[in-house]
């Protein structure tokens, strides 16, 4: 897997940073995008591989469809349990 260069801001940029998956730069900023490309180009192959792997692991823990389905099922079960406990 490979690292990413993300031209975005806000929560999405925070996810890229938190994951250690690559570099985020502000949207609509060609100079920042060019700097990000040059920065990754200057990064060692070992560090690039680490970023790519970190992105894959982050995805698997946070965005994998099976993980999301399990989280949703757990939340729905909490709601169902709460409704069942209410007097009728």
Image (cartoon, rainbow, N blue to C red):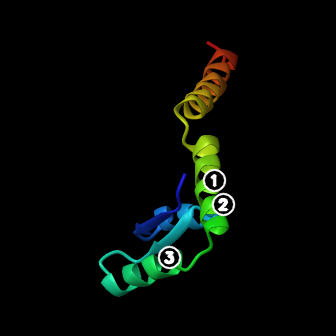
Measured Cα–Cα span from mark 2 to mark 3: 14 Å
In the picture of the structure, the residue carrying the numbered disc 2 is: 50
Query: Where residue 26 sits: x, y (%)?
Result: 40, 77
Residue 7's place in the image compared with 50, above or below, is below
The quadrant of the picture occupied by the C terminus is top right
Q: Is residue 19 visible?
A: no
Q: Residue at x 55, y 37 (%)?
A: 64
Name the foreground residue: 44 vs 6: 44
Whether tag 2 and tag 1 are in contact, CB under 8 A, the answer is: yes
Name the foreground residue: 1 vs 10: 1
Secondary structure of the residue carrying tag 2 is helix
Query: Where residue 53 sits: x, y (%)?
Result: 63, 53
Q: Residue at x 49, y 67 (%)?
A: 13
In the picture of the structure, the residue carrying the numbered disc 3 is: 41
Measured Cα–Cα span from mark 3 to mark 1: 17 Å
In the picture of the structure, the residue carrying the numbered disc 1 is: 53
Residue 80's place in the image compared with 43, above or below, is above
Q: Nearer the viewer, mark 3 or mark 1?
A: 3
Q: Residue at x 52, y 74 (%)?
A: 40
Q: Quarter-wise, where is residue 9 in the image?
A: bottom left
Q: Is residue 7 left or right of residue 4?
A: left
First reached walking from the N terminus: tag 2 or tag 3: 3
Secondary structure of the residue carrying tag 1 is helix
């Amino acid at each position: 897997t490979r690292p990413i260069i993300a031209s975005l801001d806000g929560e999405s940029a925070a996810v890229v940073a938190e994951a250690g998956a690559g570099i985020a730069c502000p949207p609509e900023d060609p100079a920042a995008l060019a700097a990000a490309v040059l920065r990754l180009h200057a990064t060692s192959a070992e560090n690039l591989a680490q970023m790519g792997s970190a992105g894959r692991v982050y995805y698997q823990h946070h965005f994998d469809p099976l993980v999301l389905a399990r989280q949703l099922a757990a939340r729905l079960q909490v709601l169902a349990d709460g409704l069942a406990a209410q007097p009728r």
